[in-house]
Image (cartoon, rainbow, N blue to C red):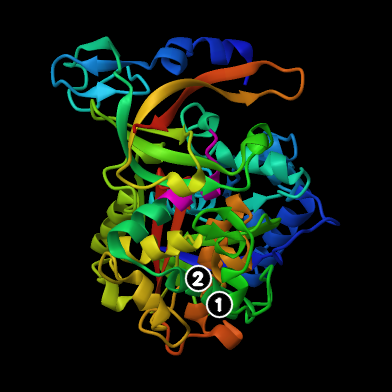
Amino acid sequence: MSVARFWRHLPQRYNMVGTKCEKCGRHFFPPRTFCPDCRRAGKIVEHKFVGSGTVVTYTVIHTAAEQYAMLTPYVLAIVKLDEGPQITTQIVCRPDQAKIGMKVKSVFRKIATDGESGIIHYGTKFVPVE
Amino acid sequence: MRDVAVIGIGCTKFGEKWESSFRDIFVEAGALALEDAQLSGEKIDAMYVGNMSAGRFIGQEHIGALIADYAGMATRHIPSTRVEAACASGGLAFRQAVIAVASGMEDIVVAAGVEKMTDVESDESTDTLTGAADREWEGFMGATFPGLYAMIAQDYIHKYHMTREQLAQVAVKNHYNGARNPIAQFQNEITLDTVMKSTMVADPLRLFDCSPVTDGAAAVIVAPFERGREFTDTPIKVLASAQASDTIALHDRRDISTLDASVAAGQRAFKMAHLTQKDIDMVEVHDCFSIAEICAIEDLGFCRKGEAGKFTADGETALGGKIPVNTSGGLKACGHPVGATGIKQVCEIVQQLRGTAGKRQIDGAKIGMTHNVGGTGATVAVHILGRV
């Protein structure tokens, strides 16, 4: 991923800054600038997510794309954030620990590397809440 | 709106075609379709070509013009349009051709699909296919296509308690059908053991739950139904053409293991054709992964939610079952050249309706359906075809 393409999403990837619609109260992560429910009548403002949620479904990836190959096997999941939206993320845990309904919280982690000398992408993963 | 008929079909053999180029395969498919319709190229008014990613797979864009040129149409200057909706590109190209004829704008139109996937390494093809999902918020987080469908499978198994063996039966059945299809990439039967002992790709999906990387092209020719018999004794009528969209990311769906776009496109198609599930003799569904076929037969209404595993294990989707699914071998065994798949599905149903499907023929087939999915269900195209 190019530097500019990654850099413009730093607030979202590092700090889970999304948006919400003040008219209907619906939260968006990743951020949307247009509320699908209220449409043009909606009013979108920034919202920083608390970073806790629940695992909706998951898988253990054994065969990954090149940039992620050093992580295998890793747990990929859809997490429902406490504020409502669902996101795709990785859970930092042993593959046999992962289960549907597990409570998780966000952590700052390395996501991928562009080859040996390329830029390192950081972002948000999740860990089980004890 | 005019009624539309399919008057010709052509399909290359699917597989790893190291010896053939992108141009070779679409010319081959187009020539087969013209020959089948006993038509000369001068009669063609327009072309629509389904192709997901020639830009990434062979570094070539502007596919519409390229295909018209190598099909010998450049000096006739016919309109030629590329259609892209990831793995549903072929289904949408067919729909565009049907709309062009139905509207009265064009008469004889080619709908083709082509993908040349083996000119890049498997890492690159995996990454290219990830572009059918949300690159920024799924792909970046380490999601792969098998990974996304594995999360659908995990959700489905959690809710409906399907067994791993029932899921594997989808692949066993599709290989059985593929072994009876001369164009299929894999023409070998497999056992439950083959699936259950294959390499784990993304838990619970194993290698034999996944469709392969394939080169191939397919083409069909459509015309006004009233002119159909000028070209063939068995014009196949397009009874319905439907398309639906949904969120690009799987995580934004109402229900992870229901493809709402399949439900919507299916309902629209049945309504348009004034038919119900009972009227369909066989269906080609988008089994990019075994779990995708399970969801498809439920989302299209051929069995109740949560019951497709048992339905499949009981043989109801096999040749001779209640509703034969993927008589071609499906994406799993026939192969999945992404842009060509939607057109190949139409070719298979037309063969069934003509009664020329050989060892996989469904006796007395009158009405068939195709179901083509882009991504994890962000685009779905459904068509119903009939012999009238």
Residue in front for this viewpoint, B311 or B265: B311
Asked whether, in this view, residue B20 is left or right of residue A25, the answer is: right
In what element is the residue under mark 1? Answer: helix
**Residue B272, quarter of picture:** bottom left
Asked if residue B189 lies left or right of residue A55, the reply is right
Mark 1, other Cα within 10 Å: few <14 / some 14–19 / many ≥20: some
Locate residue B186, reporting x and y percent. Answer: 68, 71
Residue at x-position 44% and y-position 61%: B291
| Quarter of the image with the N terminus of chain B in it | bottom left
Of B372 and B194, the residue lying toward us: B194
The residue type indicated by label 2 comes to: Ala
Residue at image location 69% in from the left, 67% down from the top: B185
Position of the C terminus of chain B, as image quadrant, is bottom left
Query: Is B147 within the magenta?
Result: yes
Q: Which residue is mark 1?
A: B192
In the picture as drawn, the residue positioned furthest to the right comes out as B19
> In the drawing, what numbered circle is on residue B168?
2
Mark 1 touching mark 2, by CB under 8 A?
yes
Vertical relation: B56 (above or below) B314: above
What span is in magenta?
B142-151
